[in-house]
Amino acid sequence: MIELHNASRWYGQVIGLNDVSTTIGPGVTAMLGQNGAGKTTLMRLITGQLRPTTGDVKVLGMDPFANVEVFKRLGYCPDIDNFPEHLSGREFVFRMARLMGIATPEAKRRTEETLTEVGMVDRAHKPLLGYSKGMRQRIKLAQAMLHDPDILLLDEPLNGLDPVGRRELMVVLGDLAARGKSVLVSSHILFEVEQMTRSILVLHRGRLLASGDLQVIRDLIDRHPHRIKLSTASPRRLASRLADVAAVLSLEIDEAGGMVEIQTRQPDVFYDALPDLVLQEGIDLYGFESPDNNLDSVFRYLVDV
């Protein structure tokens, strides 16, 4: 649905986005990066607010810049808000529906539907002036969903939401993805993004460092061996047997904590060998985990922070 081919955007002598090529299809895709990484610039190119300095951006096969046909099929939830504070949430969403050209009866119906979807139908009568950050985020999402767009772009939508609200929002985004929508989410809350999707774009200083499935990206970072922690009642005995496994590069024993940590560049080979090893030796293995198979580690490895 969204394609970028060698897209760059310059602000005078400052690079906002540098030679980015990627394709974003249906489902939820998370865009990650620190402040100044180029996330907002990328969203503004996709939403047609900016033109690329060089390269091409296509949305639904069309140039999005000032393109009304693209706008009709896009929903956008920016990271900032500038509400008419005297209106209630319901009035605001309804007026946005009318501005989109939706007839009054349909606008009323769509307003109630979207307010229900984002969990605001029982609070939408209150003035926007008194809304919390989380309530404002929900109202912004409601207006972005009003016209049932094919593509939704959400810039930091989790900001200001409590844990319950974040979970509810993730469910809404999952439902949209299940309906074939393309949802691009910009966020820095890594552990929550990991619960939302495995498809990521990593931006750093205007460049696209990686894109695709989280596990595939992790497997490509060869300079960082996988760490695997194993919990056992016999750490020294387990370690002595693991030392004979060819896939193990190094190991560390924590006898007090009942833990053995190994490093390997062949995690699949190690996981295949582990069950037979512990069964043959009669070693009680209580659990294992890989602290590297998470979004935070992948992000740190990619940007070397």
Image (cartoon, rainbow, N blue to C red):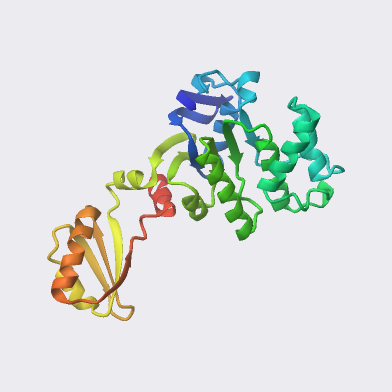
Q: Does residue 42 lie above or below 218 as drawn?
A: above
- Count the labels in the image: 0
How far across and down, in percent of the image, does residue 202 sit? 45, 41
- Tell me if residue 38 can be seen: no
Which quadrant of the view contains residue 81?
top right
> Along the line of sight, which residue is nearer the eye, 129 or 118?
118
Residue farthest along the right direction in this orientation: 86
> Along the line of sight, which residue is nearer the eye, 54 or 114?
114
The reply, left or right, for residue 152 in relation to residue 24 is right
The reply, left or right, for residue 43 in relation to residue 221 is right
The reply, left or right, for residue 55 in relation to residue 87 is left
Which quadrant of the view contains residue 186?
top right
> Along the line of sight, which residue is nearer the eye, 115 or 203?
115
How far across and down, in percent of the image, does residue 265 sit? 23, 53
Q: Does residue 76 lie above or below 231 as drawn?
A: above
Q: Does residue 37 lie above or below 64 as drawn?
A: below
- Tell me if residue 258 can be seen: yes
How far across and down, in percent of the image, does residue 96 sit? 76, 33
How far across and down, in percent of the image, does residue 49 sit? 63, 25
The reply, left or right, for residue 249 in relation to residue 42 is left
Residue under the image location 13 percent in, 72 percent down = 280
Q: Does residue 70 lie above or below 43 as drawn?
A: above
Residue under the image location 33 percent in, 78 percent down = 257
Residue under the image location 50 percent in, 49 percent down = 196
